[in-house]
Amino acid sequence: MDYLSTPKACFAAIEDYPFAEHYLNVSDQEGGSLKLHYVDEGPRDGEVVLMLHGEPSWSFLYRHMISSIVAAGYRVIAPDLIGFGKSDKPTKQSDYTYQRHVDWIRALLIELKLSDITLVCQDWGGLIGLRLVAEHNTLFARVLAANTMLPTGDHPATEAFLKWKAFSQEVQIFPVAGVIKGATVTELSVPTLNAYDAPFPDESYKAGVRQFPLLVPVTPDDPASDANRRAWQVLQQFTKPFTTAFSDSDPVTAGGDRIMQKLIPGCQGQAHTIIQQGGHFLQEDQATALSNVLLTFMQANPISIK
């Protein structure tokens, strides 16, 4: 598999991201390997919070939350999905599949020997993370889902999503920072926008960014539909604490929280939240509010000591 590694110089000017680099070799499933970058902050013996980003962001999205959660005494793992951030970037769109993304993050959980995980997932972080919760439910202690879903393709996609899907394939220069800017409700600084563009020096680095919209199951016979249906069968029996923290200004995922609250037993009795003045990327708009929701959720649902 051919891939590119973003030159380190591209990240040199990034502000407000003071985290040490960690890398893990994961199989490219073609006989080679790729480097997956992840943030690993906080005490190594602390409870683990796994923060999974989506499209077209990277772990930079969680920077303020990482600092807040570590300050509270927890260990935070925040990977960059393959094709994003500081991770390697296969150059062909066909190199990216839903299953490969799940497998790449699965490798991280296994290699780092993570357990009693609290998952925080947004956008594609949920499409990947909720699959892993279903397939390795003994490793997870709690879930916080924010502006995400686990689609099976059994229900029609929204017109807004179909337009986004078409745009992602047709636009000549994929405007990564512009997408982030357009899906937040607060004004982002130039250095912040530059940080979202930093992983992608030119279009040759953006195969993963372009492919993600094509991987969302929108028909019942999508390659990922059966696996997601099986995941829902497990999630509908998942009794561990599960909460939703959606924002009030994200038309893309609005209503997904109610579906999870209805179908997942672990949602019962939890203090589900609608975060005000937050767009799709609520980690940018309301990092403090989302951090507070997470900390309150974890403290209200302590992990049993065995």
Image: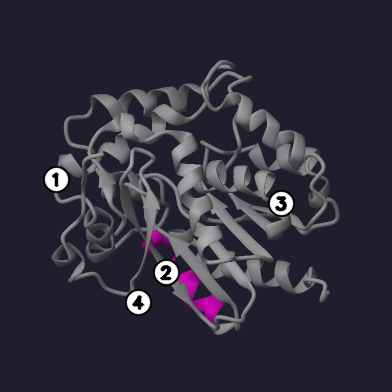
Circle 2 Cα neighbour tier, 10 Å, few/some/many (<14 / 14–19 / ≥20)? many
Q: Quadrant of the C terminus?
A: bottom right
First in sequence: mark 1 vs mark 4: 4
Pointer 3 residue: 137
Q: Which mark is residue 53?
A: none
- Give coordinates of residue 130: x percent, y percent: 62, 45
The residue closer to the viewer here, 161 or 204, is 204
Q: At numbered mark 4, what does the secondary structure look like: helix, strand or loop?
A: loop
Pointer 2 residue: 39
First in sequence: mark 3 vs mark 2: 2
- Give coordinates of residue 157: x percent, y percent: 53, 22
The residue closer to the viewer here, 233 or 168, is 233
Real-space Cα separation, disc 4 to disc 2, in angstroms: 7 Å
Q: Are marks 1 and 4 in contact (CB under 8 Å)?
A: no
Query: Of tags 2 and 1, which is closer to the observer?
Result: 2
Real-space Cα separation, disc 2 to disc 1, in angstroms: 24 Å
Query: Of tags 4 and 3, which is closer to the observer?
Result: 3
The residue closer to the viewer here, 108 or 259, is 108
Pointer 4 residue: 20
Picture residue at 21% right of the left edge, 40% below the top: 2
Q: Which mark is residue 202?
A: 1
First in sequence: mark 2 vs mark 1: 2
What amino acid type is highlighted by mark number 3? Asn
110 is within the stretch colored magenta: no
Q: Are marks 2 and 1 in contact (CB under 8 Å)?
A: no
Task: Give the residues in magenta.
Answer: 59-70
Q: Is residue 10 left or right of residue 39?
A: left
First in sequence: mark 4 vs mark 3: 4
